[in-house]
């Protein structure tokens, strides 16, 4: 799916998951200072990737998205 038309979505995560996202972002930012990522961006990318792969699996099994 396209990233055009992104809309805000507020989610709540357990603190250890939030901390892991922050750590991933910090590690990326230290090794790639010219490309700054936030924990929210990494979380969004993970969610989008998961939903896209779930949709692909559904289409492979003949399931329709609603």
Image (tube, rainbow, N blue to C red):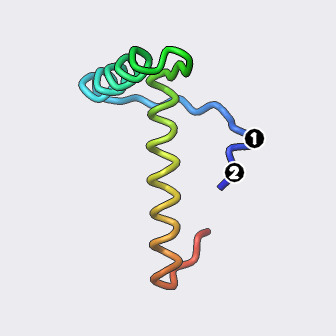
Snapshot quadrant of residue 54: bottom left
Give percent across and percent down for residue 51.
49, 55
Numbered tag placed on residue 16 in the rendering: none
**Nearer mark to the viewer, of 1 and 2:** 2
Residue lying at the far right in this picture: please name it: 5
Residue occupying image coordinates x 40% and y 19%:
31
Residue occupying image coordinates x 51% and y 37%:
44
Residue occupying image coordinates x 44% and y 17%:
29
Query: Does residue 65 appear to the left or right of 17 in the view shown?
Result: right
For residue 25, above or below residue 48:
above
Query: Does residue 46 appear to the left or right of 4 in the view shown?
Result: left
Q: Which residue is the site of mark 2?
A: 2
Give percent across and percent down for residue 45.
50, 40
Numbered tag placed on residue 5 in the rendering: 1
Q: Is label 1 in a helix, a strand or a loop?
A: loop
| On-image quarter of the N terminus | bottom right
* Closer to us: 41 or 9: 41
| On-image quarter of the C terminus | bottom right
For residue 45, above or below residue 64:
above
Determine whether label 1 and label 2 are within 8 Å by CB: yes
């Amino acid at each position: 799916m396209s990233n055009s038309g992104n809309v805000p979505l507020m989610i709540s995560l357990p603190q250890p998951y939030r901390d892991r996202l922050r750590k991933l972002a910090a590690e990326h930012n230290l090794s790639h200072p010219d490309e700054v990522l936030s924990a929210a961006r990494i979380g969004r990318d993970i969610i989008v990737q998961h939903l896209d792969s779930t949709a692909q699996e559904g289409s492979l099994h003949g399931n329709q998205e609603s």
